[in-house]
Image (cartoon, rainbow, N blue to C red):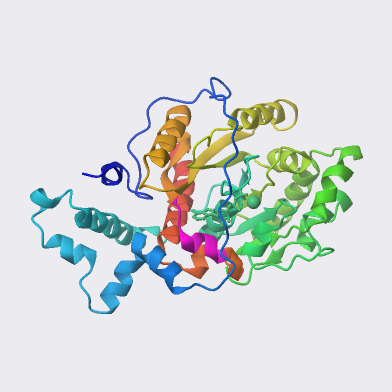
């Protein structure tokens, strides 16, 4: 048996993981790591045949196409094998993966509204780990299930604004206005056309200056919190209670991120399944401790989501195991796989939930949203 096959048998992307060992001791005993991982490239072109083939070959979409053409699906082929003899056969495993993904679709229809608005800040000072991708796709998944969601883009690069199809040339009313001019969120937030129920505050490049302008301002770390408190209270009063707020942070621990951390109760930390994935996490945890102590005592790590997971490599499984052994149940069971569809969607101004709703990437982000919503129910 090849090395890759051996790994595939242990871990199926997006289908849940074996139980985690150990619990986290945040800030303690992190490995001394120092190398940067590189962000993936966003395809800036329409889907080409090879891209489609690549995504479909590795994901469930292939089965849809095959079924539509009257070609036997992997599930049908696999069911012709005697189960005991062939349980380890790659086709049977692919089938088990695909069947599980398809079988679970109907279960995702209803997500409970949380008892009160949940505010999640998506942060990790490392760039290219999937913060923006996670923020916009989780937001879209929640909104597609009838929940009211607000996304705030706090990154001057405005990638979340792009992914949500929002205009964001310099000077557009944006998070800059909230932080620097004190403009109310209601005057800046716009409906996201492709996803009903999703409202967003865009970012512009002006935000790059806000980091410096905020330094000399009064209450510089709590400006977003105040604005958000006022907006949420007004929406609530008007009978439009927001269910989830997701804030997408820049890849730094400066005042923009601190404003995000101060405005929220929970952190959603994406960790890319790459070597040295834990680099900088101890610094992030120290920043959280500092924000907790001085600005926002209620802040906690709500969840960690593993991103860009490639089940064919021992490396990704090893990183995932290590993260789980440090953080225990904080790590969501769903690991988001590397997916061409996920990386293509922003270049069309879309989330993967609207770009290719049946793709494994979209289904996995739905799973992440489901896990997040159920997590709170479990706690209650
Ligand atoms: P961050 O916001 O942390 O900098 P992004 O969400 O922008 O990270 O992701 C970095 C790059 O990786 C982007 O090009 C994005 O499209 C791509 N990417 C993120 N998640 C995935 C995934 N699961 N599969 C493929 N590409 C991904
Ligand atoms: Mg980003």
* In the foreground, 253 or 58: 58
Vertical relation: 103 (above or below) 39: below
* In the foreground, 99 or 58: 58
Residue 235: say if magenta. Answer: no
Q: Residue furthest bottom?
A: 69
Q: Residue furthest right?
A: 216
Q: Is residue 142 left or right of residue 295?
A: left
For the record, the magenta segment spans 337-345
Q: Is residue 138 left or right of residue 186?
A: left
Which residue is drawn at the image coordinates 66% and 31% (left, top)? Answer: 288
Vertical relation: 204 (above or below) 37: below
In this rendering, does residue 179 appear at all? Answer: no
Count every numbered label the image shows and give the total.
Answer: 0
Main secondary structure of the magenta stretch: helix
Q: Position of residue 259 (x, y in %)?
A: 75, 41
Q: Position of residue 170 (x, y in %)?
A: 82, 63
Residue 341: say if magenta. Answer: yes
Which residue is drawn at the image coordinates 35% and 59% (left, top)? Answer: 58
Q: Residue furthest front?
A: 2
Q: Position of residue 366 (x, y in %)?
A: 45, 56
* In the foreground, 320 or 117: 320
Q: Residue furthest top?
A: 29
Image quadrant holding the N terminus, namely top left
Q: Is residue 109 left or right of residue 260?
A: left
In this rendering, does residue 150 appear at all? Answer: yes
Q: Position of residue 39 (x, y in %)?
A: 58, 49
Which residue is drawn at the image coordinates 48% and 73% (left, top)? Answer: 48
Which residue is drawn at the image coordinates 57% and 24% (left, top)? Answer: 32
* In the foreground, 356 or 77: 77
């Amino acid at each position: 048996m090849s090395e890759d096959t051996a790994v595939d048998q242990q871990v199926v992307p997006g289908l849940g993981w074996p139980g985690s060992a150990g619990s986290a001791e945040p800030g303690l005993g992190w490995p001394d790591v120092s190398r940067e991982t590189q962000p993936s490239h966003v395809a800036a072109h329409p889907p080409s045949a090879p891209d489609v083939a690549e995504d479909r070959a590795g994901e469930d979409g292939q089965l849809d196409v095959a079924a539509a053409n009257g070609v036997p699906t992997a599930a049908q082929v696999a069911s012709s094998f005697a189960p005991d003899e062939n349980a380890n056969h790659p086709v049977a495993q692919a089938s088990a993966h695909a069947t599980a993904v398809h079988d679970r679709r109907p279960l995702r229809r209803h997500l409970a509204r949380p008892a009160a608005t949940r505010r999640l800040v998506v942060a990790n000072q490392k760039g290219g780990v999937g913060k923006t991708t996670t923020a916009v796709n989780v937001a879209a998944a929640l909104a597609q299930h009838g929940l009211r969601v607000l996304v705030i883009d706090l990154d001057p690069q405005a990638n979340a604004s792009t992914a949500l199809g929002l205009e964001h040339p310099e000077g557009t009313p944006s998070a800059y206005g909230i932080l620097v001019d004190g403009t109310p969120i209601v005057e800046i937030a716009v409906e996201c056309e492709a996803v009903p129920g999703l409202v967003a505050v865009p970012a512009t490049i002006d935000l790059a200056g806000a980091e410096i302008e905020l330094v000399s301002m009064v209450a510089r770390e709590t400006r977003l919190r105040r604005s958000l408190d006022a907006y949420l209270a007004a929406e609530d009063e008007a009978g439009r209670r927001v269910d989830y707020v997701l804030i997408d942070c820049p890849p730094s621990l400066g005042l923009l991120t601190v404003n995000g951390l101060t405005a929220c109760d929970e952190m959603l930390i994406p960790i890319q399944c790459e070597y040295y994935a834990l680099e900088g996490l101890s610094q992030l945890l120290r920043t959280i401790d500092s924000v907790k102590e001085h600005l926002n005592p209620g802040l906690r790590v709500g969840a960690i989501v593993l991103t860009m997971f490639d089940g064919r490599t021992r490396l990704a499984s090893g990183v995932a195991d290590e993260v789980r052994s440090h953080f225990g149940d904080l790590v969501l069971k769903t690991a988001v796989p590397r997916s061409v569809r996920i990386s293509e969607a922003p270049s069309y101004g879309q989330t993967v939930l609207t770009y290719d709703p049946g793709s494994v990437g979209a289904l996995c982000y739905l799973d992440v949203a489901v896990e997040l919503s159920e997590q709170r129910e479990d706690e209650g």
